[in-house]
Amino acid sequence: MSRLRYLTAGESHGPALTGIMEGVPAGLQLTLDHIHADSVRRKMGYGRGNRMKIETDEVKILAGVRRGETIGSPIALFIENRDHQKWLDIMAIEPREGEAARAVHIPRPGHTDLVGGIKYGRDDMRDILERASARETAMRVALGAIARRLLEEIGVTIASRVVRIGEVIDETPLDADIASLNARVDASPVRVLDPHAAERIVAQIDAAREAGDTLGGIFEVVAAGMPIGVGSHAQWDRRIDGRIGEAFLALNAIKGVELGLGFRGAVLPGSAVHDAYFPGTNGARATYGSNRAGGVEGGISTGQPVVVRAAMKPIATLMKPLPSIDLRTGEATNAYIERSDVCAVPAAAVIGESLLALVLADAVLETYPADTIDALRENVGRSRERARAR
C-alpha cells in the first residue's frame, strides 16, 4: 500500500487545478518558494506556446501546512488558470442552451480526442481534451516539489537534462556533480549540456514551427543519494523500477521508458551490461564498478544514482494538420487545431523530476515508515549505517 497518495483535478481552461497529497510526515519545512521554483522551471524551454506567457502557475497552499511546516494532515494545493477568464462561457459549469462555442467534432490524430469521446460518450470532444491536456502537469509538478523536499531531508538530489530532440543528440557524459546539473542545463534554452547541440536543436525547432510541425525527443532524470534497499523483489507492485515506469508512462506523450542502459543493453553481451562488484571502501562491504543498471537491481535501489530516460513523441496538435474526419458527417477533413507547443521536451524533463520524486518519496516512506520528518531521518540514517557495516 502506498504511503504517499495524491490526486489532481481540473481542466486546462477551467477555473483552476487542484491537488491533494496525503502521507507527508509532520515537521517538514515547506514554503511556497520550494514549490514555485519547480513551477517556474516547468514553463521553460524553446518551442513552448503562448500559454506559458499567460499562466503564472502561482500555487496556493490551502491545507496541511502551518507556519512553514507540514503538520501530518493532507496537503491541499490550488493553481488558478488565468486563461480561464477568456473561457467563462465555453467552460461554464451551470447548464447552457445550445452547443458551446469552440466545440470539437474533428479529432486530432495522436491525441485522446477520438477514443476518449467514444469511451465517455461525449459528442463534444472538448470534454476529453480539456482534462487530457498537459496543463494538468502543473499540479503534478507542484505536488512533486513536496516529494522533492522530503527526499532532500535524507540527502537525495534529483536533476534532469535533455539528451535528444528530433535528430540532434547530446550524449555529453554526466559527471558526479548532480547537485549542479539543473543550474547548468537550465541556462540552455533547450536544457542540454552541449552548447553546439543547443544551437542545432533551436534551428530544428524553428524549422518545425515554420513547417507547422512538432518535435519529440528523449530526456534523462537522475536521482543521486538514494539509500540502499528501497523497493522490493517480493511482489511485482513493490518493484521500484516498475513503479518508475508506471509514473513516467502516465505522463502525456511518453511512449518509452528505460533505466540505466535500458534498450541499449538488449544488444550487448552480459559482460558489457552487468555491474561488477569490487571490495568496498570506508567500511562498505562492496562497491560497484559501474552503474549500467541505473541504480536498481531486482526492483531494489542499489545506492547508486537512479537513472531514467523517457522518450516523448511529438505533440499531437499540428499547425499544418493531418487528415481526419468530421464525426458529425463522417466526411474527410483536416484535424482540429488547438493552441499548442512546437516542442515541450525540456519541460517534460522537469516534469520527469517531479514524477521520479513522487515515486521515490513514496517508496522511501514505505521502506522507512515515519510520522515525523525527524523519525524518517533517523530511520534512514540507521539503515545507511547497517548497509556500511554488512
Image (spheres, rainbow, N blue to C red):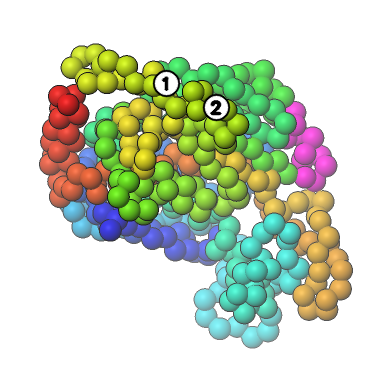
User: Which comes sooner in the sequence, label 1 or label 2?
Assistant: 2
From the top left corner, tell me how far across and down residue 46 is, in percent: 64, 34
Question: Mark 1 Cα within 10 Å, few/some/many (few <14, many 20+)?
Answer: some
Residue located beneath label 1 in the image: 290
By secondary structure, the bulk of the magenta-drawn segment is best described as helix
Q: Secondary structure at mark 1?
A: loop
From the top left corner, tell me how far across and down residue 169 is, in percent: 66, 26
From the top left corner, tell me how far across and down residue 43 is, in percent: 54, 41
Q: Dividing the picture into quarters, in which one does residue 64 lie?
A: bottom left
Residue in view at x 60 percent, y 31 percent: 267
Res 16 visible: yes
Tell me which segment is drawn in magenta: 203-213
Give, as a three-letter code, the residue at label 1.
Ser
Give, as a three-letter code, the residue at label 2.
Pro
Q: Dividing the picture into quarters, in which one does residue 125 lie?
A: bottom right
The residue at the far bottom in this view is 97
Residue in view at x 33 percent, y 40 percent: 300
Res 349 visible: no
Tell me, yes or no, whether the highlighted magenta stretch contains residue 206: yes
187 sits left or right of 237 in the view: right
Q: Number of callouts in the render?
A: 2
272 versus 237 height, above or below: above
Name the quarter where the C terminus is drawn: top left
Residue located beneath label 2 in the image: 269
